[in-house]
């Protein structure tokens, strides 16, 4: 059997390359301190709107110069040409992955994929993974209804994930509770990046619908995103190492299952 998702990733780069740390801070200096202390334990750093609007492209360069990879989490949503051109700039910056809203339409996603492929070919750039955000985890069924969407949250998530796949997007950002369904409906080659993950050792929580790293990987996530529990830990590197270990247990469980052992 082919060892694609998730076995190859956890083998090649180890779980470390599948852990994304959310750099949710307000300055380049704070970001730099965190990257410096965590880059040995964590492969990817997520840069969102706050930090990017404050620090701009130099923050992406800083992470890359320190040996980290970047997930540029700006969640693009606009007319197709505008998103495709923004995506081209993200690609030129050398980010490893970036995202956009699937609800921006099939055409918006297709045009973005085409434009990114085109400039990667013409300018010999590394091709980033292009991810779709389906339904924001802050939205409820009632919010969707008021937006004119009659479907429940889960069916809307799956509908948009399938649309993203049809547009040849590389994957989705999905909440822990949606992993299994998306994996089943969208297949193995489709990346699932999951926030809302908390170490089994976490005793506090500000999120309601969470899985542990082991559970998230076992359910089919390729990458997990963790912010606060690492950032606020007394020893952020140790907290990151604990999460990587829990991810490895999830991957080991999957390999055992794939071999048919109990
Ligand atoms: O809560 P924590 O700091 O671990 O969140 C990490 C990142 O994932 C944050 O940037 C947050 O905005 C995002 N997140 C999300 N959906 C959730 C929970 C967190 O997109 N349900």
Image: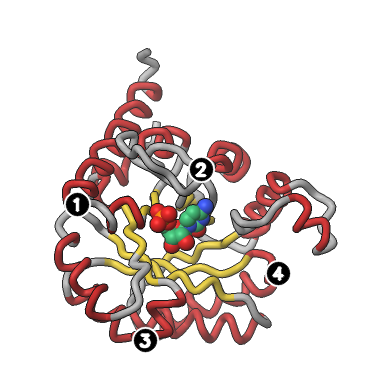
Percent of width and height locating residue 116: 48, 77
Tell which of 63 and 140 is nearer to you. Answer: 140
**Residue at x 58%, y 61% (from the top left corner):** 133
Residue 96 visible (yes or no): no
Decide: marks 4, 3 in contact (CB < 8 A)? no
Task: Find residue 56 and name its label.
Answer: 3
Under circle 3, the secondary element is loop
Instruction: Say whether disc 3 or disc 2 marks the residue closer to the N-terminus.
Output: 3
Task: Determine contact: label 3, label 2, CB under 8 Å.
Answer: no
Q: Is residue 238 left or right of residue 227?
A: left
- Under circle 1, the secondary element is loop
**Quarter of the image with the N terminus in it:** top left
Label 2 sits on a secondary structure element that is: helix
N-terminal of the pair, mark 4 or mark 3, is: 3
Which one is nearer the viewer's eye here, 172 or 176? 176
User: Which label belongs to residue 176?
Assistant: 2
Q: CA distance from mark 1 to mark 3?
A: 29 Å
For marks 1 and 4, the one nearer the N-term is 4
Which residue in the protein does label 4 denote?
Answer: 105
Query: Going 34% across and 71% down the picture, which residue do you hit?
Result: 25
Rendered position, 77 above or below 206: below
**In the image, residue 152 lies at what x, y percent?**
76, 46
Please tell me the numbered disc located at residue 133: none
Disc 2 to disc 1, how far (Cα)? 26 Å
Q: Position of residue 22 (x, y in %)?
A: 36, 62
Instruction: Say whether residue 121 is left or right of residue 9.
Output: right
């Amino acid at each position: 059997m082919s060892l694609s998702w998730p076995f190859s990733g956890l083998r090649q780069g180890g779980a470390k390359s599948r852990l994304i740390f959310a750099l949710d801070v307000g300055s380049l200096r704070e970001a730099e301190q965190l990257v410096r202390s965590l880059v040995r334990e964590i492969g990817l750093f997520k840069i969102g709107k706050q930090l990017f609007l404050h620090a701009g492209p130099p923050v992406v360069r800083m992470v890359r110069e320190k040996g980290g990879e970047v997930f540029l989490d700006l969640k693009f949503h606009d007319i197709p040409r505008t998103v495709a051109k923004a995506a081209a700039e993200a690609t030129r910056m050398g980010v490893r992955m970036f995202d956009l809203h699937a609800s921006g339409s099939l055409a918006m996603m297709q045009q973005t994929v085409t434009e990114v492929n085109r400039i990667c070919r013409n300018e010999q750039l590394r091709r980033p993974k292009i991810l779709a955000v389906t339904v924001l985890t802050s939205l409820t069924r009632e919010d969707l209804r008021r937006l004119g969407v009659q479907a429940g949250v889960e069916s809307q998530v799956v509908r948009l994930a399938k649309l993203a796949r049809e547009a040849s997007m590389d994957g989705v950002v999905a909440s822990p509770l949606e992993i299994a369904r998306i994996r089943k409906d969208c297949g193995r080659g489709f990346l699932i990046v999951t926030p809302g993950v908390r170490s089994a050792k976490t005793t506090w929580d500000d999120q309601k619908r969470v899985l542990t790293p082991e559970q998230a990987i076992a359910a089919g996530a390729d990458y997990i995103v963790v912010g606060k529990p690492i950032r606020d830990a007394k020893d952020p590197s140790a907290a990151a190492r604990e999460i990587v270990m829990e991810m490895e247990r999830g991957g080991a469980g999957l390999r055992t299952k794939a071999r048919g052992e109990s």
